[in-house]
Image (cartoon, rainbow, N blue to C red):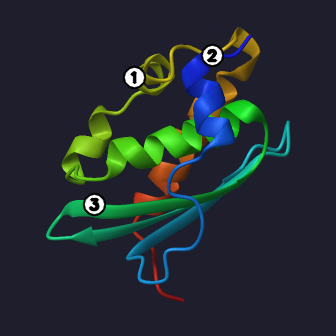
Amino acid sequence: MYSPQVLNHFEHPRNTGELPDATARGQVENPVCGDVLELALKVENGIIIAARFRARGCVASVACSSRLTEILVGRSLTETAEISRENLVESLGGLPQGSTHAAELALEALAETLKPKVDS
């Protein structure tokens, strides 16, 4: 059902946990399935030098979050626009049709994290 890459990222997720010195943070939730993803990035000179996530969700959500953090590190903020749902899914060896929402959630978290925040 799941590719070996998806199972590997689920069983051995990369870049999990807190990133105390993050320069950007975001959180999104899928109201349909209840998956929650928090993403934190450390950006220096326009380059993502660290990424961490915390997720509560299905196998695919954890795997997509883990893989996304790997893809992000070393990229410029401009280059993040090149990451598509298809790229993420393909880099994991595919996802079952009912699990593609996990890639969307990961990219929504990235967009939320990079969205300019207004001080209240």
In the picture provided, is 97 more to the left or to the right than 76? right
Q: CA distance from mark 1 to mark 3?
A: 19 Å
Mark 1 or mark 2: name the one nearer the start of the chain.
1
In the rendered image of this protein, does residue 100 appear above or below residue 62? above
Q: Nearer the viewer, residue 81 or 87?
A: 87
In the rendered image of this protein, does residue 88 appear above or below residue 44? above
Which amino acid type is marked by label 1? Asn
Mark 2 or mark 3: name the one nearer the start of the chain.
3
Quadrant of residue 42 within the rendered picture: bottom left
Location of mark 1 (residue): 87
Which amino acid type is marked by label 2? Leu
In the picture provided, is 83 more to the left or to the right than 110? left
Question: Under tag 3, what secondary structure?
Answer: strand
* Residue 79 in view: yes
Mark 3 Cα-neighbour bin, 10 Å: few <14, some 14–19, many ≥20: some
Q: Nearer the viewer, residue 68 or 83?
A: 68
Location of mark 3 (residue): 48
In the picture provided, is 104 more to the left or to the right than 42? right
Which amino acid type is marked by label 3? Ile
Mark 1 or mark 3: name the one nearer the start of the chain.
3
Quadrant of residue 11 within the rendered picture: top right
Q: Where the C terminus falls, by quadrant?
A: bottom right
x and y percentages locating residue 41 in the rendered image: 41, 65
Location of mark 2 (residue): 95
Residue placed at 65% from the left, 28% from the top? 7
